[in-house]
RNA sequence: GCGGGCGUAACUCAGUUGGUAGAGUGCAACCUUGCCAAGGUUGAUGUCGAGGGUUCGAAUCCCUUCGCCCGCUCCA
């Protein structure tokens, strides 16, 4: 889900600033770069670390019901079989040689018709100048019963669509060297829609492969994880057994993931190596909630989502997490004015998902996804249980106790009710009955709500929303542009800049060094003594440092004794300055950055 | 992967019909008792994206390749 781009050079300015000030570099740049990979420089590293920490704090340390996990990037290949990534990510694909549209090799409909070959195509220009031309051989199937003229028109349109604006309008394209090659019957070598010749079938795998061990044969293949989530499911049993957690609870993980993106683009937005922040929050199935509480709370506009309630069903939990995540974004400076939500329709949803919300951010290149919050039912754990053969059911004492108190008739009518209200029409009576019998024993596979966010996308969102160019006019009436990154102080790479007014006065420098030493244990401080004071302020504005502290002669007590040991503190966004005692400095700054 | 555009100093860019590389900003050093990219003095920097070819000579022409941007791809 993404929408229209904005057409200024904002993005270019941000990319340029990121490079110039050491926030983000292209990976391996001295060797010409490598597509879809990006490095964080000194300041970008701090920014990213701060963002990672805010997520981790909000999701684990500030809550009682979520624990952490830090799994390996390479896991047993069977994990990706079970999750479905090997199959859905690795089909044999063929591409139409005219339109480049992809089809699965095993899904090509057989076609009958005449094969026409063109040696190329060119744009017809009135002035007779050299225009756009295509020197590639085009082999196209003319469907049985298709008129030759409508066929030619169709080919011109396909070419025009694929060539972009440069080729001009379809009627301005001239097809060259037309030749009828042969008549084919039931051929699977042509694209079902365009009729264009398909290239060789080749595996199209979105997972990055590697080999374990020295032999590097197909038996040694392993994958770099395309998402961090699966490790959480794979370690679900161990976490349960070792951590005394009780459903509902969550497991959070932050880590690198890899996808062989066809088209990395929009700076770091779609990268091949990226960092995910994922939570799997395990909840009781609605049936279990119903057995325990007699009812399941469902969502309405009046629902109070501030604190979880015992009778919540998956829908409430899903809404709850959307609200939680929204609150998180607000806490780091991304408010409702830059966010948007996309509730996936039934058709969009993966077959196992019950609901999914995308939290979108208004990037300069369009509104695009920052986080997905999916209600995935029990799909993943069930898959891993089936593939591994290991029991992944959870024993719920509360549920067991509730069911033990039920009569046989109550249980029978519960099964009846569950069957009549089943969401999956293919579920048989036997399956429903056996699931219910498990529930009566207190056993179920937990359902899961999955808020899954991209750390690099978050960093990019923060950068683009913080970036500002402000026209400031000085005393002499000269105006110029002030570039400033308006980071929330909590996530700013550098919290405070400390400046002696002049560097050739040892007393000022010494005092400034003292202030730096005092602050350093508590925050990232930057000391700068070079150049004019105004320049030093502006240098810090550009990397989003929220505060600047200047040590001047009044600090030394030259002007008046009352001002001794006070400094000017300058605020980034307003550029306002005021004097505060050095002794108040630390508590003032800590109040702003925590 | 396909089509179009682009690639020259840290950044933004100029560079004539092929004749050996330039501006602004930034950066570094010094001076300055004063607060918003201030002023002055001095200074450093480029395999002209990479490789190959044509040529006496290539940033410039040709081929190949890599990367970036824009279009077709999806879901962190």
Image: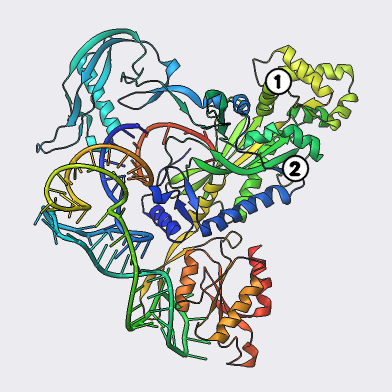
Mark 1 or 2, closer to the camera: 2
Chain ID, mark 1: A
Same chain? Circles 1 and 2: yes
Residue that label 1 marks: A421
Q: Residue A293: which quarter of the image?
A: top right
Q: Position of residue A166 (x, y in %)?
A: 24, 38
- Residue A308 is tagged as 2
Q: Position of residue A530 (x, y in %)?
A: 47, 76
Q: Is residue A301 visible?
A: no
Name the image quarter holding the C terminus of chain A. Answer: bottom right
Q: Position of residue A52 (x, y in %)?
A: 61, 51
Asked if residue A480 lies left or right of residue A313, the reply is left
Q: In the rendered image of this protein, does residue B17 appear above or below residue A350? A: below
Name the colour scheme: rainbow
How many C-alpha atoms fall within 10 Å of the one at disc 2: few (<14), some, or many (≥20)? Answer: few
> Seen from this angle, which residue lies furthest top?
A185
Asked if residue A322 lies left or right of residue A290, the reply is left
How many C-alpha atoms fall within 10 Å of the one at disc 1: few (<14), some, or many (≥20)? Answer: few
Q: Position of residue A170 (x, y in %)?
A: 22, 29
Q: Nearer the viewer, residue A212 or A121?
A: A212
User: Earlier along the polypeptide chain: callout 1 or callout 2?
Assistant: 2
Q: Residue at x 60, y 85 (%)?
A: A555
> Seen from this angle, which residue lies furthest left?
A127
Distance from the alpha carbon under mark 1 to that under mark 2: 25 Å
Element at badge 2? loop
């Amino acid at each position: 889900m993404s929408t229209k781009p904005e057409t200024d050079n904002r993005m270019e300015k941000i990319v340029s600033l990121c490079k110039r000030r050491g926030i983000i570099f292209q990976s391996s740049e001295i060797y010409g770069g490598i597509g879809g990979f990006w490095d964080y420089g000194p300041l970008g590293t701090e920014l990213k670390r701060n963002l990672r920490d805010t997520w981790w704090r909000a999701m684990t340390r500030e809550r009682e019901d979520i624990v952490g996990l830090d799994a390996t990037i390479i896991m047993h290949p069977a994990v990706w079989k079970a999750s479905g990534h090997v199959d859905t990510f690795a089909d044999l694909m063929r591409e139409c040689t005219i339109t480049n549209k992809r089809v699965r090799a095993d899904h090509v409909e057989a076609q009958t018709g005449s094969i026409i070959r063109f040696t190329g195509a060119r744009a017809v220009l009135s002035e007779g100048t050299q225009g756009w031309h295509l020197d590639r051989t085009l082999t196209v199937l003319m469907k049985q019963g298709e008129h030759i003229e409508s066929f030619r028109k169709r080919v011109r349109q396909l070419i025009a669509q694929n060539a972009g604006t440069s080729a001009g309008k379809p009627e301005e394209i001239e097809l060259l060297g037309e030749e009828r090659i042969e008549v084919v019957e039931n051929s699977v070598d042509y694209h079902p829609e365009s009729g264009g010749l398909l290239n060789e079938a080749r595996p199209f795998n979105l997972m990055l492969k590697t080999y374990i061990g020295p032999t590097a044969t197909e038996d040694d293949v392993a994958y770099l994880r395309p998402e961090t989530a699966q490790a959480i499911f794979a370690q679900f049993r161990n976490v349960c057994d070792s951590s005394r957690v009780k459903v509902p609870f969550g497991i959070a993980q932050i880590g690198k993931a890899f996808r062989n993106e066809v088209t990395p683009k929009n700076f770091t937005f779609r990268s091949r190596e990226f960092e995910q922040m994922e939570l799997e929050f395990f909840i009781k199935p609605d049936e279990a909630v119903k057995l325990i509480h007699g009812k399941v709370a469902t969502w309405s506009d009046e629902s109070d989502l501030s604190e979880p309630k015992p009778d919540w069903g998956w829908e409430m939990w899903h809404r709850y997490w959307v609200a939680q995540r929204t609150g998180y974004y607000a806490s780091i400076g991304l408010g409702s004015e830059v966010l948007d939500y996309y509730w996936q329709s039934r058709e969009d949803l993966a077959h196992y998902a019950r609901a999914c919300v995308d939290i979108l951010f208004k990037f300069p290149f369009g509104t695009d996804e920052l986080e997905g919050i999916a209600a995935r039912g029990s799909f993943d754990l069930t898959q891993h249980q089936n593939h591994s053969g290991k029991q992944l059911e959870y024993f719920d004492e509360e549920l067991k106790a509730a069911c033990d108190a039920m009569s046989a008739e109550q249980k029978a009518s519960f099964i009846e009710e569950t069957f009549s209200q089943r969401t999956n029409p293919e579920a048989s009576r036997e399956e429903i009955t056996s699931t219910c019998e498990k529930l009566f024993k207190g056993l179920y596979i937990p359902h899961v709500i999955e808020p899954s966010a991209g750390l690099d996308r978050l960093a990019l969102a923060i950068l683009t929303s913080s970036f500002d160019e402000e026209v400031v006019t000085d005393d002499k009436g000269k105006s110029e542009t002030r570039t400033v990154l308006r980071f929330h102080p909590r996530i700013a790479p550098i919290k405070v800049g400390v400046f002696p007014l002049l560097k050739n006065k040892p007393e000022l420098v010494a005092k400034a060094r003292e202030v730096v030493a005092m602050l350093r244990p508590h925050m990232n401080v930057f000391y700068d003594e070079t150049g004019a004071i105004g320049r030093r302020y502006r240098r810090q504005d550009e990397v989003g440092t929220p505060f600047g502290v200047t040590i001047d002669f009044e600090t030394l007590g030259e002007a008046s004794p009352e001002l001794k040991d006070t400094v000017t503190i300058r605020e980034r966004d307003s550029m306002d300055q005021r004097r505060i005692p050095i002794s108040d400095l630390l508590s003032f700054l800590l109040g702003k950055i925590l």
